[in-house]
Amino acid sequence: MTMTGAQILLKALEREGVKHIFGFPGGAVIDLYDELSRCPTIKHFLVRHEQGAIHAADGYARAAAQVGVCLVTSGPGATNTVSGIASAYMDSIPVVIFTGQVPTALIGNDAFQEVDIVGITRPCTKHNYLVKSVADLARVVHEAFHIARSGRPGPVLVDLPKDVLGGRTTPKFPEQVKIKSYNPTYHANPRQIKRALDLILKAQRPVIYAGGGVISSGAAEELTRLAETLQIPVTNTLMGLGGFPAPHDLWLGMLGMHGTFYANMAIHHTDLLIAIGARFDDRVTGKIEEFAPEAKIIHIDIDPTSISKNVVVDIPIVGDCQDALSQLNELIAALEPRDWAQAHQPWLDQIAAWKRDHPLSYDRNSGELKPQFVVEKLYELTKGEAIITTEVGQNQMWAAQFYPMKRPNRWMSSGGLGCMGYGFPAALGAQVACPHDLVIDIAGDGSIQMNIQEMATAVEYDLPVKVAILNNQYLGMVRQWQQLFYKGVYSQTSMAVAPDFVKLAEAYGGLGLRAEKPEEVEPVILEAINTRKPVLMDFRVSPEECVTPMVPAGAPTHKMILV
Amino acid sequence: MRHTISVWVDNEPGLLSRVTGLFSGRGFNIESLCVAETVEPGVSRITLVTSGNEQIIEQIIKQLRKLINVIKVVDLTGTEHVEREMALVKVKAEDRFRAEVLRIADIFRCRVVDVSPHAYTLEITGNNEKIGAVLDLLKTLGIQEVVRTGTLAIQRSKKN
Ligand SMILES: Cc1cc2nc3c(=O)[nH]c(=O)nc-3n(C[C@H](O)[C@H](O)[C@H](O)COP(=O)(O)OP(=O)(O)OC[C@H]3O[C@@H](n4cnc5c(N)ncnc54)[C@H](O)[C@@H]3O)c2cc1C
Ligand SMILES: Cc1ncc(C[n+]2csc(CCOP(=O)(O)OP(=O)(O)O)c2C)c(N)n1
């Protein structure tokens, strides 16, 4: 039976188990939208800006641990997704982006709403396709999903000329996707695992540095088992938060530029760094020559390019975190029992002393409303059980510091690109994936204005996301740098002129709340949680609060600014 | 250090810009790049010459392997292999130099592929150094135009 391209695409999506897509229509995809109106299995969420669609697909992918899907038209629809694609690429998030394209015969002619989106996104997608014939469509769609979710995940873009969507053929849906030149390595080499174990058994001051790879691999349990059995402390990257249960005694919090004192000190003094699904980002390493200067390094990563890219490692292990950690755990289980807590006691004592001397802190007695206090209250009143998304800047760092995550897939932040405007649409995506969970976007007053239009989407689809705006009336993170490193010249970082967020929320049909004093915070949060509507909470916080600790850019990680 | 790398690729439109984009985007050098089909349908082979320290060459190779359409990458440097380049050179052929041009051509086993009253066009094949040496000699006689391929390279077969 012949089908149109639009029908084939939707059928392929169904075969991939897609239930939700985020998108925005236009001429080049109008046939597809027409077909979509008759598709019972896929629910489409109409965003108000295409950047919202791609971030929502990203948040959905992280919360559901599935491929997120985004659909936009050609030209400006496609270019509006680029920031979000770049963010998903940097953070290795599996999304498939479908873009409309002008008819094949017009490609290259500067046709109306034509852009070379495949060319534009080549460096920020894991792979991309221009589908030139309807005969290729079914295969390409399935390949796109396969590539997006396998190996090191990432965004894959599929460009769909109008005549391909309108063309007809009898489709052949492949039972299994096979790409001869693409075979990610999941199984870690047992010899390397054995060598790693030898080092681990000898180490006196080991630390685990666990990143986003633990989340995408679904290896949180294996990681916890390893750390607990051997009594090895664990620090997480911003992307790895939730990959190890934060309330745990062995947890050191986040490391890096705004990491805890004790995590960074542990890194500086460790004799064995076990990096698991983390990529030695410069926000983590600081001055690279002085990163973990005393340590041998084991690195588990599914992507060979991550290994020895920034820091040369002693034991490279290419493979999936889950596979590698399971192998390690099995070898350890077969060892003669040993009292690991005792073996590592001096090291654990040293860490406990660092924790005691320099815990995360802020001035609790100023009488002012502090942003950290707001985040702490959010944690307390939600019992640490909410899904948290963040915007970018100070709000993001305070969220990471003061909302410790207990479980994986509940923390979403634009880490690698640091894309302002990510948090709110990502929260919508997460809410679609987890309709029964409380989803909170911890936001800044600057970032929230980048995709505030998605309030309409939240209201339309009854997505009761809460936004906690830490409103400091500045582009706070940039202001902080200006305060510390640019003689306090606040060049173009004032956000004093801003909408009344309470009225704005109401104008969209949501609820707006405000707190100006510490004692107003709790009632505002409780009312937000108890309202089944999208809510903007405007917390008027101390304008010139800084995020600490801070490792100045390019400094070694043990040289932190503490207050 | 200079490395010659062979890359087998699925011959898909846009493939070449994926490869060159990788080099420009990540700040890797490309000294030369040659690409053409192999005997296997749909598979092309790229020979590229690049330079960098050990860590950079390792990244280049890994990044190339990571491209979805790349089938195989082999670093030929450090293995037994043959390298060839070709150049076509149009040399001024003034009367007093005609014999000299032909003599150089003969010594270096160049072929004369075109002759006109005022110029000879020579075809030179050899490795990078040989071509450089011939061009240096011909320069003194007056080169009008030169085109060169990049390096092609192939591993030597095992002797037994
Ligand atoms: C304002 C700002 C401040 C920041 N400050 C900090 C900071 O203080 N500390 C901090 O940590 N970050 C900070 N970041 C984030 C930082 O920029 C990076 O995004 C982050 O450090 C990268 O985390 P990661 O190393 O876990 O890598 P990710 O980007 O999560 O990469 C995951 C790695 O795991 C691998 N992987 C993926 N899947 C698997 C699998 N199945 N098995 C094995 N491996 C896999 C991938 O190949 C990759 O190498 C900040 C960002 C911003 C915007
Ligand atoms: C799209 C984008 N533009 C610019 C930046 C640079 N930048 C990083 S943090 C920041 C300030 C963010 O301000 P706000 O959202 O108010 O958050 P705060 O730091 O005050 O919590 C800026 C401008 C960015 N990360 N993303």
Image (cartoon, coloured by chain):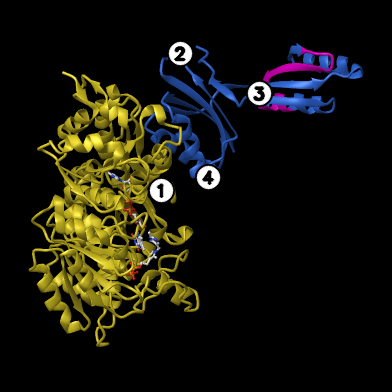
Chain colours: A yellow, B blue
Residues in magenta? Answer: B115-132
Both on one chain, marks 3 and 4? yes
Q: Are marks 1 and 2 in contact (CB under 8 Å)?
A: no
Residue nearest the observer in this picture, A293 or A382? A382
Which numbered disc flags the more N-terminal residue, 3 or 2?
Answer: 2
Of residues A509 and A93, the one drawn nearer to the viewer in this rendering: A509
Structural distance between the alpha carbons of marks 4 and 1: 22 Å
Tell me which amino acid carries mark 1. Val
**Would the CB of label 2 be found within 8 Å of ligand 1?**
no
Quarter in which the C terminus of chain A is drawn = bottom left
Q: Chain of mark 2?
A: B
Q: Quadrant of residue A143?
A: top left
Task: Residue A435: give x, y in percent of width and height.
Answer: 10, 54
CA separation, marks 3 and 4? 26 Å
Q: Do callouts 1 and 2 point to residues on the same chain?
A: no
Place of residue A78 in the rendered image (x, y in percent of width and height, measured from the top left): 35, 44
- Identity, as a three-letter code, of the amino acid under mark 2: Val
Q: Where's residue A264, x and y in %? A: 35, 65
Asked whether the residues under marks 4 and 2 belong to the same chain, the reply is yes
How packed mark 2 is, by other alpha carbons closer than 10 Å (few <14, some 14-19, many 20 or more), is few
For label 3, the SS is loop
- The answer for which chain carries disc 4 is B
**A61 displayed left or right of B138:** left
> Which label belongs to residue B27?
4
First in sequence, mark 4 or 2: give its number. Answer: 4
Q: Quadrant of ligand 2?
A: bottom left
Q: Chain of mark 1?
A: A
Question: What residue sits right under mark 3 in the picture?
Answer: B127
Circle nearer the viewer, 4 or 1: 4
Q: Which mark is residue B39?
A: 2
From the image, state whether disc 3 or disc 2 is nearer to you: 2
Q: Alpha-carbon distance for marks 3 and 2?
A: 24 Å
